[in-house]
Image (cartoon, rainbow, N blue to C red):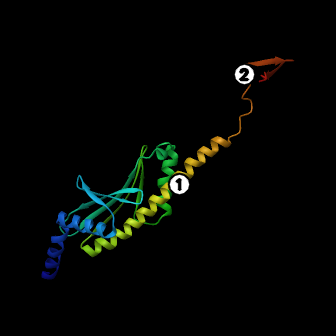
Amino acid sequence: MAISNKFSGFLGGFTSNIGKLRKVAMDYFASEGIACEIKDGELIFQFGDSVYTLQLCAGDDYAECVIEYACDAEEYTSLDITDKIFIADKVNTDLYNHATVYAYNDSFKIDSTFYFTSKNMWNELFIKHFNELNESVRMVWEIICDKTTGKAEEEAEKPKKIGFCVPEENENVNGNNVAAVVKK
């Protein structure tokens, strides 16, 4: 019993100190050449063209890390609600990973959460969860692009409806009700 208390106390020193947790994350980003800043208690970093947030929550025996990507792009907001739900469902079911897509009316977010007890564990889990999250982001954007370009192409290729020149009044010819044709 004494060994587990010492072990728990040792880990608690790291996982309960938010300053140490942030320093580990900031040092990792610096070693990868990724600019990072702390704003409102969150670490904000840019990978490629995407901006991510990292939240670290201290605990006695373990700490929590939440990586999040949120977006309210015009391409997404222009989609129907059924398309938005389809995107979240498709990515969540097709990709077997820890990232979860949340679809809202005017935005979407993808997050991944893990718990850790040491610096090495944080590093390994961060890399795994971030790669999974990035894979989900890529898939969401592929589907959004397919949906938005597909709609534009559908509208351009949509055939004209038959009867677009026909007025609403009908003529009575030989006792039959026949629509009048208007020549243009």
Please report whichever mark, 1 or 2, sits nearer to the chain's N-terminal start.
1
Q: Describe residue 155's horizontal placement relative to residue 4 as left or right.
A: right
Give 80 or 134, whichever is nearer the viewer.
Answer: 134
Q: Amino acid at mark 2?
A: Pro
Q: Position of residue 88 (x, y in %)?
A: 47, 54
| Residue 25 sits in quarter | bottom left
Query: For the point 52% across and 48% down, which residue is it?
Result: 83
The residue beneath circle 2 is 167
Q: Amino acid at mark 1?
A: Ile
Q: Secondary structure at mark 2?
A: loop
| Residue 64 sits in quarter | bottom left
Q: Secondary structure at mark 1?
A: helix
Q: Determine the residue located farthest toward the right in the rendered image.
A: 174
Give 172 or 128, whichever is nearer the viewer.
Answer: 128
C-alpha span from label 1 to label 2: 41 Å
Give 61 or 107, whichever is nearer the viewer.
Answer: 107
Query: For the point 23% across and 52% down, which residue is it?
Result: 40
Q: Residues within 10 Å of mark 2 (few under 14, many from 20)?
A: few
Q: Is residue 145 above or below residue 23?
A: above
Of circles 1 and 2, the one toward us is 1
Q: Position of residue 85 (x, y in %)?
A: 48, 49
Q: Describe residue 19's horizontal placement relative to residue 65 as left or right.
A: left
